[in-house]
């Protein structure tokens, strides 16, 4: 049930298995243990696509296809969080005013600029990664998507919830425990070690630093994290993994 819930929350895939009325906040929090497994699942899909597309297309075109596929599968959930977080943290406001800016359906200048920068960066890093031997690139894709989803688990556990009136992430933040962090870390570490060996520890450490930095900035400006901030942590994790995997560290 936990993996199914995680897949339902992190993707827009037509997954069945339980109804909304049967889901408790405890179930939602418990499902976070399987966030890295969802990342591995997405990585497998991207790896299969890469293995086929690379036979006929250059890495730059395959990168566009993979980015488009991830956006479609995730329903643009994480990039939306990235852009809203940029609007809130860079708005010059604090607390409820900054949170209101993030919730506003209108897109601000900071969101547009940082959205463009993020997508361009992802494209460049992904193109570089896909220029590596196919098996190596596929291994890094899977490890990257696993650890980036782990960021959301750690961010949820480490920081308080910012909104007073509830929101998408409140059920997760209210009930998450050390158990979910330990299980998710174990899953990410085991799969990642099998895929990329000792580089696993580089990914773990770098993602922890980046997630902590984003969380502390959100706590200072907003009073805590929100679902948007967790989405931004996931995108940051993807950029970190692609950078390291492509030879950045």
Image (cartoon, rainbow, N blue to C red):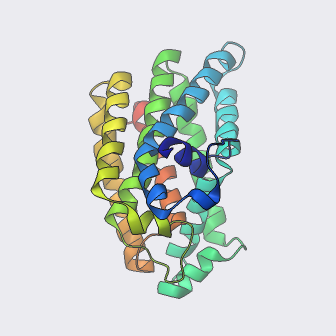
Asked if one can make out residue 53 in the rendered structure from this viewpoint, the answer is: yes
Asked if 245 appears above or below 154 in the picture, the reply is above
Asked if 65 appears above or below 23 in the picture, the reply is above
* Relative image position of residue 180 (x, y in whole percent): 35, 51
Asked if 135 appears above or below 129 in the picture, the reply is above
The residue sitting at the front extreme is 22
Q: Which residue occupies 60% across, 67% down? A: 84
Q: Which residue occupies 26% across, 28% down? A: 198
* Relative image position of residue 52 (x, y in whole percent): 67, 16
Q: Which residue occupies 68% across, 37% down? A: 69
Q: Nearer the viewer, residue 45 or 180?
A: 180
Asked if 162 appears above or below 40 in the picture, the reply is below
Q: Nearer the viewer, residue 164 or 55?
A: 164
For the C terminus, the quadrant is top left
Q: Which residue occupies 72% across, 73% down? A: 105
* Relative image position of residue 138 (x, y in whole percent): 51, 23
Q: Nearer the viewer, residue 209 or 24?
A: 24
Asked if one can make out residue 148 in the rendered structure from this viewpoint, the answer is: no
Is 226 on the left-hand or right-hand side of 13? left
Image quadrant where residue 55 sits: top right
Is 200 on the left-hand or right-hand side of 16? left
Is 51 on the left-hand or right-hand side of 178? right
């Amino acid at each position: 049930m936990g993996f199914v819930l995680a897949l339902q929350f992190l993707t827009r895939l037509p997954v069945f298995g339980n109804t909304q009325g049967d889901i408790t906040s405890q179930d939602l929090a418990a499902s976070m243990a399987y966030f890295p497994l969802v990342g591995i699942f997405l990585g497998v899909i991207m790896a299969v696509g890469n293995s086929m597309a690379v036979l006929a297309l250059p890495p730059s075109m395959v990168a566009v296809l993979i980015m488009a596929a991830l956006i479609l599968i995730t329903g643009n959930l994480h990039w939306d969080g990235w852009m809203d977080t940029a609007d809130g943290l860079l708005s010059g406001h604090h607390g409820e005013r900054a949170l209101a800016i993030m919730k506003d359906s209108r897109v601000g200048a900071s969101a547009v600029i940082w959205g463009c920068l993020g997508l361009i960066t992802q494209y460049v890093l992904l193109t570089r990664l896909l220029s590596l031997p196919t098996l190596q690139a596929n291994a890094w894709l899977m490890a990257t998507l696993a650890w980036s989803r782990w960021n959301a688990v750690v961010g949820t556990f480490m920081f308080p919830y910012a909104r007073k009136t509830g929101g998408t992430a409140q059920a997760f933040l209210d009930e998450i425990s050390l158990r979910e962090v330990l299980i998710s870390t174990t899953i990410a570490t085991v799969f990642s070690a099998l895929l990329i060996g000792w580089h696993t520890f580089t990914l773990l450490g770098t993602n922890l630093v980046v997630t902590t930095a984003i969380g502390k900035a959100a706590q200072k400006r907003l009073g805590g994290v929100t679902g948007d901030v967790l989405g931004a942590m996931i995108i940051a994790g993807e950029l970190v993994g692609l950078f390291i995997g492509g030879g950045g560290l």
